[in-house]
Structures are given as structure tokens and as C-alpha cells.
Amino acid sequence: MVRGALACAVVLGVALAWPGWTAGLGAQAVPAPVGAQTSVLVIVDPGHGGDDPGAIGPGGTEEKALTLSIAQRLRALLQAQPGFRALLTREDDRRLTADQRAAFSNAAGGQVFISVHANASPSPTTAGFEIGSLIAVDGPPGDTESVDRAPLLPVASGPPRRVAVLRWNRAQASHQALAAMLAEDLGRRFAGFGGPGPRGVYRAPLRPLVAVAAPAVLVEFGYLSNNDEELALATEERQIAIAQAIVQTLEATTPMVVR
Amino acid sequence: MMVGRALRAVLGVWLLGVAAWGCGPVSGPPSDERAPVPIADAPPTATSHITATLFFGASGGGGLVPARVEVPLAPTIAEQAEAILRAALADPPAGMLRVVPRGTRLRAFYLDGRGGAFVDVTSEVVRLHPGGSFGEALTVAALVNAVTANLVAVRTVRLLVEGREVDTLAGHVDVSGPIAQDMSLVVSDKRP
């Protein structure tokens, strides 16, 4: 994994040195970041996919389908909102690794990363939303820099150039505080959906967020293992309400969260 | 008469002290973790047990609850950890819930000599995991806490699946590095 992380760091470093070479880095071809954009690019990450169904409810609802459905609704709402653009890490039922999801976001220049999930518990009575942000367990204390700006690297043509190399396993480190703030705001907005789960708004070593170079949160909008919540989450009404809550939070907090 | 009784009492206390020293605390820090460390001078008998604190799912679903479980006394720290983990992978006591997928077995346990341990389990822990970041966090904490709460010589645990490092068990919780004890998920069973 370390070798892969180093390779990703170097690849992204070269990509940053040579804009336009980012297509194909992630799960699908993404446009290279373009100059100054006035709109905020939100990367929406539907959890699981392919041969990884995620949690499965007692009624058979698969998390991977639910997350894709809500992610698509969220993208539609964001695209209709002035000041926002949105991309999905996956458009269909396919499996992606956490690093592929992060690479897609980083290559596209994502400014906020929302990983969309449903939860599960050994107890069928556990219920409620939970919003997680990363607490890194890697690296020495106080090491919060995500980018090493020093290296002088060779490029395909011309003289070596000084590039910003993303430290893959520390990519989220310098965004943790803003991500925690976004998670708190989402938690307040989600309070209308039956209250928080056992952890509510929490911080944990969440692998899908580790390599994302933007404030990143993992939103779990309910427990699929709970029969009542599975039924509610399967409805269009609840899915739209969840997407709206996320959009309203982003509208309110983006000026503070996006650098 | 009085002197004789006092001498017998002193001798009794001394013998109890020697016996307690001989059995020793299972969780006491070893002088050298690289080598198997005997925890008793005499081989344990078939009836020797320790009481270990294990962690299972709260019936209300809010987290983990501790359970005091008798496990066989073992002659080394590593073998004691294996006995504890086998108990942690077994069916939970009545009224508690399983948080590690049924069928998951312990493959191996290693000490790294620096306060770290490796717990190697079979692939059922991934293949049969019901998912959810909460359920996954309970699985990880139950395994890590079972070791660290009973063997103070072990401060962190690396989880391996079929002998290999993995990033996660169910897609959420990063288990690619050493994991410290986490009691934040331990709740009173009365809590929903």
C-alpha cells in the first residue's frame, strides 16, 4: 500500500505540474481543472458498488443502490444551484477502491467531498444518522501538511519544475478541522431525520477520506439494518429530503469551508 | 499455644504470597516480548483459568458491553492472547450480540516486541461482514480491546486477514496501521 501511495503521490505531482494529463487517473475520465472557477466543485461519492453491496437491509435493500440513487439526486440539486458544480465518483454499479475515489476527486480539483453511505448494526433497533470526519492515525503529532511544495521533479519535456506533491496518506490532514466543522453543520441539518445514531457527529480513522485533498465527510443517513429506516430510505421523498439537507448545509457553510 | 497459632498464621500468609507470585498477573509487562514469556513457574493445570474482559454488542444496539469470561490460563503471553481471542470469537453470553461475523477464526497471533501485536483472522471477518461503518467499528474495537484490555504489555494491534494486511474490513474503518484500544464505543447495556 505504501508503494501504491507513493506512486499516487508522484503521479499527482506530475499531474499538477502538467495540467491536462489528469484524465483517466480516477475511476472515469474527468476534465482537468480549469483556471479560476467561481462555482464550488462538490465531489459526491456513492459508497460501495459492484461486487461490494455494502449493508443489506432485512427487506433486501442494498446500500450500493441506495447510495447511488441519493448521490444522483444530490448532484441534480447541486447542478441546479448557482455557485455549485457536482461530479460523482461512480455513475453506475461498479466497485472502486478508496484510493480510486480520492484520486478522482483530487484530479478533478474537488473542493468538498461527500461520501454517501447507509449504516448497519448488529441490533435491528439501532437507528439515526451519523456524520463522520477523519481523525488521522498516521504521521507524527502536529504533522498536518498535506502537500510537500519543495521537490524539483523532472517533467516530460523541458527543464525540471517545482511541483506540489500530495502526500497521499496525509492528504486529508490539513482539511480535518474544516471537515469536522462541515460534519457538525450537517449534523444540525439532519436533526429532523429522527435524531442521531449512537455516534451522531463523530471523528474516526475513516479510510474513504484519508487521501482526499479537500474537506471530506462520510454521511450515513440511516440504518439499513433497521426495518423502519430501510422502508423510509427507500422512498423518493426521504431521498430528496436528504439531498436537500446536504445542499442547504453546503450553501450555508461553503464560504467557510472552501479555501 | 498462642505463639504456635501466630506462627501458623504467618506461615499461611507467606505461602499465599508465594503462590500469588508464582501465578503472577497475566497482563504484567514481560521483560522481553520477543521471546515467549512464561507467566507461571509451573505448567497450568486443566482447571487453571483467568477471567478476561471481552466485548460484545449491546442488546440495545448502542455499542459494546464488557463481559467477564473465564478463559484457560496459558503459559505464554502469546498463547494467552490466543485463548482470549478464541473466546472473543465464540458465541456471546446470553443477552449480548455478536459483532464479529460467525465463522471467523483466529489464524495466528504475534508480538512484535515493541508493544504491538498482530491478530490474524480468517476471511469470514470480511466476506460475512454485514457492513455499515458502525458495525465495522464495533468489530474492530471488540478484537483490539479484547487483547489490549487483558494484556497490558500490548498497546496496539494490527489486524491481518488470511495473513495479509487489509485497508478495511467493510469499507470504512482504516485498519491498515496499528490500532490502539478504543473504549469510546463501550456503553451501558441499558442505553438504547
Image: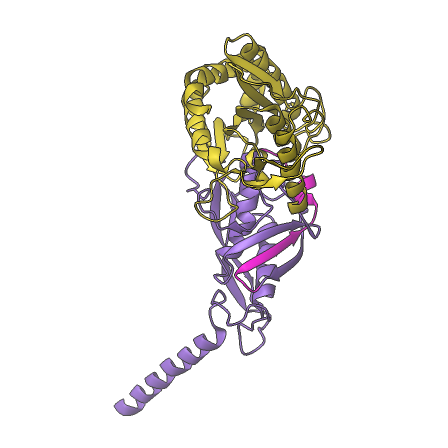
Chain colours: A yellow, B purple
Q: Is A211 positioned to the left or the right of B60 in the image?
A: right
Residue B84's x, y, as percent?
57, 58
Q: Quadrant of the C terminus of chain B?
A: top left
Number of labelled discs? 0
Whether residue B60 can be seen here: no
Residue B126 on the magenta span:
yes
Figure quadrant of residue A95 = top right
Residue A144's x, y, as percent?
47, 40
Residue B21's x, y, as percent?
45, 76
- Above or below — where is A28 with respect to A238? below
User: What span is in magenta?
Assistant: B113-132
Q: Is B86 positioned to the left or the right of B66 in the image?
A: right
Q: Residue at x 43, y 80 (%)?
A: B18
Closest to the observer, A76 or A50: A76
Residue A30 on the magenta span:
no
Which residue is the extreme one toward the left?
A: B2
Closest to the observer, A259 or B175: A259
Closest to the observer, A54 or B90: A54
- Above or below — where is B7 with respect to B95? below
Residue A219's x, y, as percent?
52, 26
Whether residue B96 can be seen here: yes
- Above or below — where is A224 with respect to B82? above
Closest to the observer, B145 or A15: A15
Q: Quadrant of the N terminus of chain B?
A: bottom left
Figure quadrant of residue B117 = bottom right
Which residue is the extreme one toward the front?
A: A159
